[in-house]
Amino acid sequence: MRATRIETRVQRAGGLVTLVAVALLLRGIGGALRRPRGRATGHARRVLRAPVCVVESLLFFMACGWLWRPLPLALSQSGRVLALVLGTPLYIAGLLFVVWGRWALGEMYHVSSGFGVQLHAGHRLVTQGPYARLRHPMYLGVALAGLGGLLLYRTWTFALVTALVPGLQRRARREEQALAAEFGEAWATYCQHVPPWRPRPRGRRDSREG
């Protein structure tokens, strides 16, 4: 049927975009682990080492592959169309947020953990691109992509991704603590102007932002 063909094409296109996003993240992690280290918080020096990151990444991707099985949902034709219409923009927008955020961070990108955060030596505060509107655009992107993927693909893999989203809030708090310690007043001023998760409408932004 036509709706099934469209769904299949959208799923394949989403898979290609996902591969690009994952490749960019892995490349960024590889580069970050080779750079001189700066301020660290929590247990970052133990958990954010190359061997640990490699093992964690392999386990995560193995789990995603093993869980790539359909959820026990029997949607009607109209239900599948609705899931496609709702899931596609969420999924694509989420992936674009992840890629855009990764691109904006550039050399400042580093993997983090709920157990600790590692900054680079000479770390710079990034406030351009999506970070001019949100403090955590990449995490918001993961949340949107998880929800959109759950609607679009309806597999246990995206159920896992969605279940992990609350843990991103803990990672975000850890990152904010490290950045506050590193940048002090500059970070406090940035936080006054830029919300963590939901961008303010332009008309409601602080007038001091220009």
Image (cartoon, helix red, strand yellow):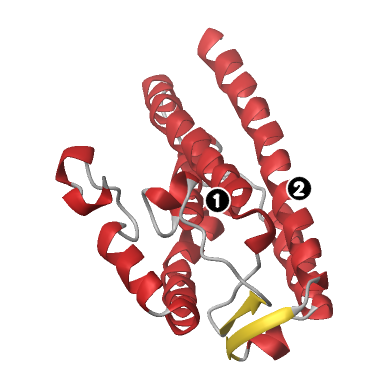
Neighbours of disc 2 within 10 Å: few (<14), some (14-19), many (20+): few
Q: Residue 191 vs residue 112: left or right?
A: left
Q: Amino acid at mark 2?
A: Ala
Q: CA distance from mark 1 to mark 2?
A: 18 Å
Q: Residue 109 vs residue 178: left or right?
A: right
Residue at the spot x=15%, y=45% of the render?
204
- Whole-percent x and y of residue 98? 56, 47
**Mark 2 sits on what residue?**
23
Query: Which quadrant of the figure contains the N terminus?
Result: top right
Residue at the spot x=55%, y=49% of the render?
101
- Camera-side residue: 65 or 208? 208
Give the numbered dot on residue 22.
Answer: none
Residue at the spot x=22%, y=41% of the render?
201
Q: Amino acid at mark 1?
A: Phe
- Camera-side residue: 125 or 175? 125
Question: SS at mark 2?
Answer: helix
Q: Residue 64 vs residue 73: left or right?
A: right
- Give the mark, 1 or 2, whose residue is nearer the N terminus: 2
Query: Which quadrant of the figure contains the C terminus?
Result: top left
- Whole-percent x and y of residue 28? 73, 57
Choose mark 1 or mark 2, whichever is in front: 2
User: Quick check: can you spot residue 193?
Assistant: yes
User: Quick check: can you spot residue 154?
Assistant: no
Report which quarter residue 120 is drawn in: bottom right
Give the numbered dot on residue 158.
Answer: 1
